[in-house]
Image: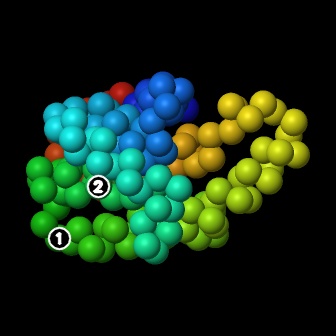
Amino acid sequence: MLSKQSNAVKTCEMYRRQGFACSESVVRALADEWNLALPEEFLKEMSVFAGGAVEDGRCGVLEAGLAIMAELYVSGLFGKDVSLLELSKLLHREFERKYQGYLCSDIFYPLYGQHQKSNLKEEEFFCAFHDGILIIMNFLCKKAIREEKHNYEKEVN
């Protein structure tokens, strides 16, 4: 696994074990990885997206990824030839490829069913935390155009 991605997963898991919701754990880990100095209030507000809590029921991990992507977009990380709306649609498609949907219910219930069959402890269930943040990190790194992309590619090679 690539080190930037591995760090994101480890950081996300650290926040999850501290009791943060899926969306808040992911946004905190992504902000750490992309060196975004986000206000603590914003980070806490992200917990509202946990468990498909928004009206449309989208995955909190995806919502966190979209929030960080928007922050990075505004900072100029992506080229002007692509819109934030287009990037959002593409990230949704990545989740659909992996999970056959992007609603919390599309992701949580199948993963939880697999977890129950595995006989692992309940606290070892991490839903889409790990794979979801990897999807987001891969997507952001592939789409980035600034120095961060260059640094990331050097790290990988």
Q: Which mark, residue 81?
A: 1
Question: Which of pointers 1 and 2 lies earlier in the amino acid sequence?
Answer: 2
For residue 141, side relative to residue 14 (left or right): left
Q: Is residue 30 visible?
A: no
The residue depicted at 30 percent of the width and 31 percent of the height is: 32
Q: Secondary structure at mark 1?
A: loop
> Given the image, on which type of amino acid does mark 2 rest?
Ala
Query: Distance from label 1 to label 2 (Cα)?
Result: 20 Å
Q: Residues within 10 Å of mark 2 (few under 14, many from 20)?
A: some
Total residue callouts: 2
Q: Position of residue 100 (x, y in %)?
A: 64, 69
For residue 63, side relative to residue 128 (left or right): left
> Which is nearer the eye, 150 or 124?
124
Q: Position of residue 61 (x, y in %)?
A: 46, 52
Above or below, comparing residue 95 to residue 149 in the picture: below
> Which residue in the protein does label 2 denote?
67
> Which is nearer the eye, 121 or 61?
121
Above or below, comparing residue 145 to residue 150 in the picture: below
